[in-house]
Image (cartoon, grey):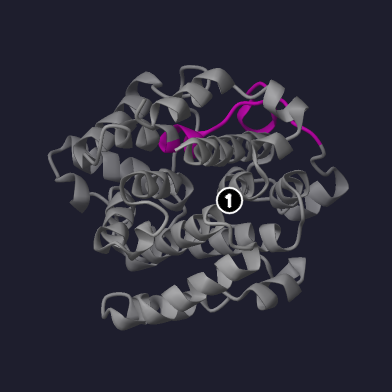
Amino acid sequence: MELLYKQIQDGILGLAVGDALGVPVEFLPRRKLRWSPVVEMRAYGTHNQPAGTWSDDTSMTLCTLKSLTKGVDYDDIMNRFCRWVDDGYMTAYGKLFDIGRTTLYALRLYRSGTPALQCGGTDVRDNGNGSLMRILPAIFYLRREYGATCMDNPEAFELIHNLSRLTHGHAISQIACGLYCCIANDLMNGATLQDAIDSAALVLKNWYGLREEFVPWISEFDFLNAETLAALPEEAIKSSGYVVDTLQAALWCLITNRSYHDCMLKAVNLGYDTDTVAAVAGGVAGILYGAESIPEDWLYVLAKKEEIIRLCENFLPA
C-alpha cells in the first residue's frame, strides 16, 4: 500500500501541476508560444489567475478521487461536480472559471432528473477531452480493490467507461479513457513507457476490436504505437480539445521527452488546449518520474498543495 500511496500522489500532483502550468496560456496558438514559450509557472494570462492555479481538469479529478475513496457511487460523483459548478467546491480559490460545453450540458441533464449514467453526450461531436482529463483516479481505485492485475478484472473497463459516461458517453471517449488507464496501470507495474503504449495498442485490437459498439471507432487510435509516435514531427500533433488529439498529444510529449519538466513544457507550448494536454500528460509523467521530479518552484506555488496531498493520503485505508 505504501507504493500505491506514492503513485497516487505522484499522479495527482503531476496532473495538477501540468494543469496549472497550462492555465495562463490556454487557447493561445502554437505560433505565438514559439515567440514567447512557457519556461516557468506563469501568473494571470488567459484566465487572469495567480501562478499555480489549476482548472476544471484538477477540480473534476479531485471530485472523482474524493468520491471513490468510499467506493463507486455515480450519483455522489455527479453531485460533487454540481457542487464544483455551484459553490466552487474543489476549486483552487473558491470559484469555477473554466468548464467544457459537453460537461456543462451533462450536469444540467443530471439536475433535471436524468440518471447519472445517461447524462454524457453520445453524439460524435461530444468527444471533447472532459472525461479523459479526470479519469486517472479510476486506476487508483481499481488497484486498491483488485491489485496490480486489476485491468484483467471484468469490472475494470465497465467502471472506466461508466465514469466517462457521466459527461462523455460516446464510444471514442470511452476508448480513450480505457487506453489511458491501461498505460497508467502498466507504468505502475514497472513497464517502460514504450511497452505500456504498445501494450495499450494490443488492448485496442484484442479487447475493443472484439466488441461491436467500439469497432467503428478503432481507426481513430491508429497512432497508438510507441515507435510511430516518437517519429512524428510536432507539425503532425494537434493539441485541440478533441479527446483523440489530446491523448495523442499527451503521449507524444511523453515519448519524445525524458523528464517531467521537459514533457510539461513541450505540452503547454503546443498551444490551444494547453491545460488539458499538460494535465493528461502530467498524470502519467508524475507516475513515470515521481513527484520528486516536479520542479520545486512549480510545486511551491501550486494552489492547495497540502490539501491535495491529504486527499491522496485519505484514499487508502489507514
Task: Please state which amino acid type lies under the numbered disc 1.
Answer: Val
Indicate yes or no whether the magenta region holds residue 59.
Answer: yes
The residue identified by callout 1 is 284
Image: magenta residue range: 40-61
Quadrant housing the N terminus? top left
Residue 129 appears anywhere in the view: yes
Residue 301 horizontal/vertical position (percent)? 68, 21
Q: Secondary structure at mark 1?
A: helix
Q: Is residue 21 left or right of residue 33?
A: left
Residue 34: image x %, image y %?
84, 51
Q: Is residue 307 magenta?
A: no
Q: Indicate whether 151 appears above or below 195.
A: above
**Is residue 292 or residue 223 the one in the foreground?**
292
Task: Name the residue: 67% across, 63% down.
Answer: 252
The quarter of the picture where residue 245 lies is bottom right
Q: Position of residue 294 (x, y in %)?
A: 71, 36
Crowdedness near tag 1: few (<14), some (14–19) or many (≥20) residues, C-alpha within 10 Å: many
Rendered view: 77 above or below 123: above
